[in-house]
């Protein structure tokens, strides 16, 4: 039952109030409302058809419907740096792949980023939050972005008989990699991610994502989406990361579960299947053996490309 729906005259924000049962008993279609944060999907329009994947008419947020609003960290109190694509053309660098889905990367030098704030790549600092910076008019072309640190330098892998890791001999600040469907070698330590419909992220006051500590390079991967192949589109979007040199007591990190493509995270999938449901997800031993104790999960985000 809808109680009210109103729009703020100053901000344009819409607020609404409804009465719904705590448990509709309509399994498996409805979940019972519990005293915890849950994902809430929203959409608006004149019909129930939302075929446009990108846009501003749908999104998601998390909320505890049985608790008070959460305290939001004021990121304005912290220093920040903007990591932006340097006006790149949205053209896929790989000729043999879908041209409507370019993946483009750019490198960022921690020594360059720290000049105004006063840190170098050798220092340990904490990232306390992040938010997207989207070029005006380009929202419909942005699919998602990820930001990673480059944790490994080039070395010879005797088991594989080849060199692996990051070769930084020819890197420079704002270097663009137009063919970047796969992350550059040695740059897979994910520290931030954002996709259409998501909000800015902030960590609790005693938690931060460590960066620096001798890891000089950051890599941002932008996934663009241009289904109608609009020509001459350039982009300078990216992410603003909020930083502090006053280290917090707890280091945080991100875990990436890609159950559909990571063969070590689920049982073998039989060949010839046109539809399959994976009921089991493994956290691989190479990951869990590094844990020194129980982990605290602060948040969860889903990313399923064209499925939501």
Image (tube, helix red, strand yellow):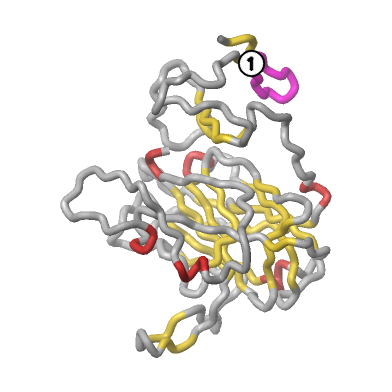
**Label 1 crowd bin: few (<14), some (14–19), many (20+), radius 10 Å:** few
Instruction: Indicate left or right for 87 with 271 as reference.
Output: right
Q: Which residue is label 1 attached to?
A: 17
Residue at 76%, 38% in the rendered image: 71
80 up-or-down from 163: above or below? above
Which sits in the foreground, 180 or 159?
A: 159
**Residue 86, can we see it?**
no
110 up-or-down from 255: above or below? below
The magenta stretch spans residue 151? no
164 up-or-down from 24: above or below? below
Residue 21 place in picture, x, y as percent: 55, 16
Residue 139 place in picture, x, y as percent: 53, 40
Which sits in the foreground, 8 or 247?
A: 247
Residue at 68%, 56% in the rendered image: 82
Q: Which residues are magenta?
A: 6-15
Instruction: Indicate left or right for 174 with 44 as reference.
Output: right
Residue farthest along the left direction in this orientation:
272
Instruction: Indicate left or right for 265 with 110 as reference.
Output: left
Which sits in the foreground, 61 or 149?
A: 61
**Residue 234, can we see it?**
yes
């Amino acid at each position: 039952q809808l109680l009210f729906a109103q729009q703020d005259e100053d901000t344009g924000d819409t607020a609404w109030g409804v009465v719904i049962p705590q448990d509709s008993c309509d399994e498996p279609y409805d979940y019972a409302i519990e005293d915890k944060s849950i994902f809430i999907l929203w959409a608006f329009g004149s019909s129930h058809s939302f075929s446009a994947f990108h846009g501003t008419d749908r999104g998601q947020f998390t909320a505890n419907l049985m608790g008070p609003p959460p305290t939001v960290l004021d990121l304005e109190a912290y220093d920040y740096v903007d990591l932006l694509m340097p006006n790149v053309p949205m053209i896929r660098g790989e000729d043999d792949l879908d041209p409507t889905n370019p993946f483009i990367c750019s490198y960022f030098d921690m020594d360059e980023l720290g000049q105004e704030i006063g840190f170098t790549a050798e220092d340990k600092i904490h990232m306390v939050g992040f938010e997207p910076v989207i070029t005006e008019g380009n929202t419909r072309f942005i699919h998602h972005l990820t930001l990673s640190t480059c944790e490994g330098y080039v070395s010879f892998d005797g088991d594989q008989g080849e060199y692996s890791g990051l070769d930084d001999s020819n890197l420079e600040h704002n270097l663009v990699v137009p063919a970047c469907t796969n992350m550059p070698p040695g740059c897979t330590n994910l520290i931030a991610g954002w996709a259409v419909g998501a909000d800015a992220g902030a960590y609790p006051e005693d938690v931060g994502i460590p960066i620096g500590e001798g890891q000089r390079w950051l890599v941002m991967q932008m996934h663009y989406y241009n289904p109608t192949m609009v020509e001459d589109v350039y982009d300078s979007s990216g992410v603003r990361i909020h930083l502090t040199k006053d280290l917090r007591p707890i280091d945080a990190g991100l875990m990436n579960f890609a159950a559909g493509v990571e063969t070590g995270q689920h049982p073998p999938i039989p060949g010839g299947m046109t539809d399959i449901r994976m009921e089991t997800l493994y956290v691989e031993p190479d990951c869990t053996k590094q844990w020194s104790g129980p982990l605290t999960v602060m948040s969860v985000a889903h990313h399923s490309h064209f499925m939501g």
